[in-house]
Image: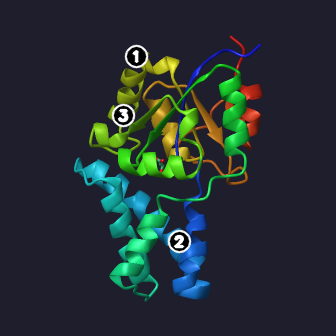
Amino acid sequence: MERREALAFDVYGTLVDPIRIDTRLERFLGPDATAVAEAWRRKQLEYTFRLAAMQRYEDFAEVTRKALVYALAAAGRSLDPAQQEALLAQYNDLECFPDAVPGLQRLAQAGHTLVVCSNGTPAMLEALLGNAGLRGYFRALVSVDEVRAFKPAPQVYHHLARRLGRPPGAVRLVSSNPFDVLGAQAAGMPTVWLDRSGGLFDTLGPPPAVVVRALTELAGALPAP
Ligand code: 2OP
């Protein structure tokens, strides 16, 4: 029997694929596109971690813009402002993973409460999830912008729990990002690791008890009450 849970989904890398922006980058950069997309994502996350460590905040749209400029420079490439704007607009229209819609459908049918918890700004999340056809599954979009901190700062997860009116132990974070899984665990939340990497988890801590390879497995993998 499935227990009805409050499930909070990470977005980038979990529901939508930030690396697939390489198809748009290809028009401008040809064969460098995938390497630049990967460097862009790595730098974007690095900036969020560094801002969190410095206890400073610039929103995710700004961080994403600065990370793009860095990734282009690191590859020895440059794009004109209109091309950069086109890429940043595309960041709100990323491809969703093929298991996202069927997985969320099953969870919604089973009666679970679904929300999003993301580094994205509220405007980014509304646009992105609307464009991906996912918005309707979520009761709330919880953005780190509301506490001006980035994952894995504990205040993000405590804020998520407050928004849901539940203690942290009664909200389960679902993420493909190990740093997010471990951050939520450190804040007292049960978690699910969505393994999109072929088994490579962080060595900072053990993977959670619930690991799935696709969102379509999740409804059947949640522990019985
Ligand atoms: C998210 O917060 C960590 O990028 C990831 O959606």
Specify the amino acid type for callout 3. Pro
The residue carrying mark 3 has its beta carbon less than 8 Å from ligand 1:
no
The residue carrying mark 2 has its beta carbon less than 8 Å from ligand 1:
no
* Residues tagged 1 and 3 counted as in contact (Cβ below 8 A): no
Instruction: Looking at the picture, tell me which residue is in the foreground, 50 or 165.
Output: 165
Q: From the image, state whether disc 1 or disc 3 is nearer to you.
A: 1
The first of marks 1 and 3 along the sequence is 3
Give coordinates of residue 130: x percent, y percent: 52, 47
3D distance between C-alphas at marks 1 and 3: 17 Å
Residue under the image location 63 percent in, 53 percent down: 96
3D distance between C-alphas at marks 2 and 3: 28 Å
Specify the amino acid type for callout 2. Ala
Q: Which mark is residue 154?
A: 3
Please give the residue where the numbered disc 1 appears in the rendered image: 165
The C terminus sits in image quarter: top right
Please give the residue where the numbered disc 2 appears in the rendered image: 37
Q: Which mark is residue 58?
A: none
